[in-house]
Amino acid sequence: MANRITKVPERSEIEERYQWNAPSIFASVEAWETASQELRADLPRLAVFQDHLGDGPEVLNAAIDLLQDLIVRAGRVMVYATMSHAVDMGDQAANRMASQARALYGQLNATSAFIEPELLARDRD
């Protein structure tokens, strides 16, 4: 069997049915940018729950609902950015998006880091 070197086709050369459907997540890079900025702006909303998770079930429920919303939104931002990056790793704009998405996800993790220790420190009742 002879060694064959094959050229990887450009995205534009691949039938659309075999491509990732990035527009199903965000219609455009601009929409992704807007969602990223909105997510970044909403992260501080989680901090108001710090030291208050034991104030009652309504407070805990509100904190968990907000956290879940932020996680879902961060996941969408991450998937879109990493799909764009995986299509062409030489694309500097896609590299920037993927880096921003990873940083934003890290910020979410840092912002929510108080939740588990605070819950574990609570009395079971």
Image: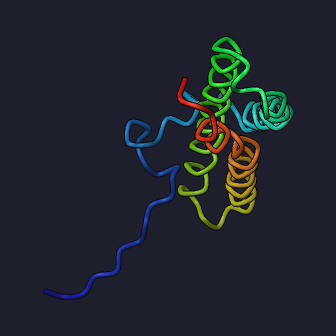
Residue 12 is left or right of residue 43, and the answer is left
Percent across and percent down for residue 9 are 44, 61
Q: From the viewer's side, name the closer residue of 58 and 73.
A: 58
Quarter of the image that includes the N terminus:
bottom left
Quarter of the picture holding the C terminus: top right
Q: Residue furthest left?
A: 1
Q: Residue at x 64, y 45 (%)?
A: 117
**In the image, is residue 103 above or below residue 54?**
below
Residue 113 spot, x, y in % from top left:
69, 46
**Percent x, y of residue 87:** 54, 55
Q: Is residue 74 left or right of residue 96?
A: left
Outermost bottom residue: 2
Residue 116 figure quarter: top right
Give coordinates of residue 75: x percent, y percent. Answer: 59, 38
Q: Is residue 3 or residue 58 the one in the foreground?
A: 58
Q: Quadrant of residue 122?
A: top right
Is 68 located above or below residue 89 in the figure? above
- Residue 66 versus residue 33 in the image, above or below: above
Q: Residue at x 41, y 71 (%)?
A: 7
